[in-house]
Image (cartoon, rainbow, N blue to C red):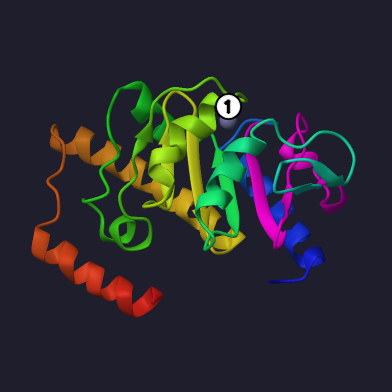
Amino acid sequence: MREETALRSELVAICRKLERKGLIASADGNVSCRVGADRLLITPSGKPKTDLEPRDLIGVNALGERVSGHGRPSSEIHMHLAVYAQRSDVSAIVHAHPPLLTAMTLAGQPFRADILPEVWLTVGTVPTAPYATPSTSEVPDSIAPFIADHHAILLERHGSLTFGRTLGEAYRRLEILEHAAHTLFYALLIGGCPPPAMPDKDREKLDQVRKKLFA
Ligand SMILES: [Zn+2]
């Protein structure tokens, strides 16, 4: 595990990128990473992400109780804890409000992971968790069935949750998905109908590539 000072800087840099790239507005969203066996760093509640400094991050234990820092941890802390509890391979989580991915959930459209090779290779299928009241225990309950077998989950009427072995991986998955959503949207406008899925044989080849690259 990388040194805490470096992780704090990287986490804050990702928060700024989220705002700059239009993936959140102001204090929206939350980002966390593991910094020990039973300790996390997470963004504080209510602070605009562009104003965050590394010292503003809150240290919490596996129960979500603050063990360092000032202020309150993100109100979605229990959504993060639910992922870490099920996935020992996950060390970082990014929750954002990406406009196009969120719009797809408003339109009742499932995310199509089987169209673009980059998505199939790096993220895989992306389920949509049913609507849950933000900041309540409804949210961890709504995502619980999807955590074990996915790297990303869309939250109906709310946003996205991407996770990874590193902060960079969790963030990249978000960028890849929102970028893919734009591409699919253009394909629909240009072609007038949803684009076809990649044939099974092409997806199987990508599965082999994934095994080689990420084993
Ligand atoms: Zn949110």
* Corner quadrant of residue 34: bottom right
Residue appearing at x 54%, y 64% in the figure: 165
The answer to whether residue 70 is magenta is no
Q: Of 209 and 74, which appears nearest the observer?
A: 74
At 43% from the left and 30% from the top, the residue drawn is 102
Give percent across and percent down for residue 55.
87, 51
In this rendering, does residue 61 appear at all? yes
Q: Quadrant of ligand 1?
A: top right
Left or right: 35, with 119 as reference point: right
Q: Is residue 21 visible?
A: no
Residue type of the residue flagged with mark 1: Ser
Number of marks in the image? 1
Residue corresponding to mark 1 = 137
Asked if residue 64 lies left or right of residue 163, the reply is right
Q: Residue at x 16, y 67 (%)?
A: 204
Q: Position of residue 186 (x, y in %)?
A: 27, 39
Indicate yes or no whether the magenta region holds residue 29.
yes
Q: Position of residue 212 (x, y in %)?
A: 32, 80
Relative to 128, does residue 166 appear above or below in the rendering? below
Which portion, as a residue range, is magenta? 28-57
